[in-house]
Image: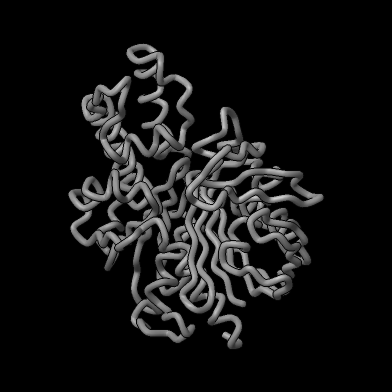
Amino acid sequence: MNIGHDQGFHSTKAIADGGRQTIFPSFAARPSDSLFSMNGHKNAVITSTRTGCLQVGESAVKMARAGARLETASWVSMPEYLAMFYRALSDLTPARGVSVNLVTGLPLADYARDKDKLRSLLLGTHTFTRQELGHQQTITVDSLRVVPQAWGAVLALLLDSRGAIVQPELMQEKVAALDIGGHTVNYLSVDGLSDIPAETRGTDRGAWNVVRAVRDYLDTAHPGLSRMNDHAIMQAVAAGEVWDQGERIDLDPITRPVLDDIGQEIVSTAAQYWGDGASTFRRVLVIGGGAYLWGEHVKRAFRQAVIFDRPELVNALGFYRFAVYLSKGG
């Protein structure tokens, strides 16, 4: 099975053969099962000797009073990271045993430091149980390629889902990719399918900064909402509203100044890294969940900017297509 896997600080995304895909919040906590549920108790509880017992994803966001919403450079060494990876695998296949050809990614700022660590963590055999399936799964990662995030945008254009090269002009073009995530922003410059180190960087500034501003406001103005976890606040930011005792609270006056400030910072940082050479980019590819928040800021600064449909899934899609390409001897 070929899998493209993109585990971000906000959400985990993965795509596999047959068009199978998953996306869920990168959040894990000790299990807290509901007493009654109409969703069949699908609470994604993962158990293994390497992770312990953890509830992962949407149900953890809804029910956990505390948990790991990881935002640290060392998170690939934490059991929660591995539990999220197991959740993604079990979403893609219920099989008791399967071999995997995996391509995954790391933020540009963490890539050199953590790629060997992540390779050691994921390569090999993984045995775990997902509560809803009721049986143990043994999934072996036979082959693994770790690539920098943002490269998914280039790979998604270069290749199709059969691993065939469909835009050979990218072998000659100079393009940029701007990957805006929950915690990081990746600035990638590529010329002839090679990245340019002097124009490629990663920064620790993303959508969680907006969440922190909203939390500060809620703690003061609406203390009854102070127990909302960060993913729930992120959902409120996306909706533009939150409810306190039946009263609708418009979040736009709180989020708009922060969004504008970070949007200007993203554009200014891109201009700093890319300099006058930005005019030579044929395209600036905008991906990541932050594209919903700041895509228009980027388009105003770079006329050649292209915002992908479902930008949060593009890295996983590019990684999947690259996995298929590699499986065919590419």
**What colouring style does the render use?**
one colour
In the rendered image, the residue lying farthest to the right is 49
Q: Please name whichever residue, 273 or 130, is drawn nearer the observer in this view of the structure.
A: 130
Corner quadrant of residue 125: bottom right
Vertical position of residue 77 compared to residue 265: above or below: below
Q: Is residue 293 above or below residue 145?
A: above
* Picture quarter with the N terminus: bottom right
The answer to whether residue 147 of the structure is visible from this angle is no
Where 294 falls versus 319 (above or below)? above
* Residue 236 position in % (x across, y down): 34, 35
For the point 41% across and 52% down, the residue is: 187
| Nearer to me, 37 or 55 | 37
Q: How many marks?
A: 0
The answer to whether residue 4 shows anywhere in this view is yes
Query: Where residue 189 appears, x then y in whole percent?
Result: 40, 60
Q: Residue 55's spot in the image, x, y percent?
A: 63, 44
Q: Quadrant of the C terminus?
A: bottom right
Left or right of residue 323: residue 286: left
- Residue visible at 37% across and 77% down in the picture: 170
Looking at the image, residue 267 sits to the left or right of residue 108; the answer is: left
Q: Is residue 147 above or below residue 42?
A: below
Q: Residue at x 28, y 53 (%)?
A: 276
The residue that appears at 57% across and 49% down in the rendered structure is 41
Image location of residue 270, percent across then percent down: 34, 47
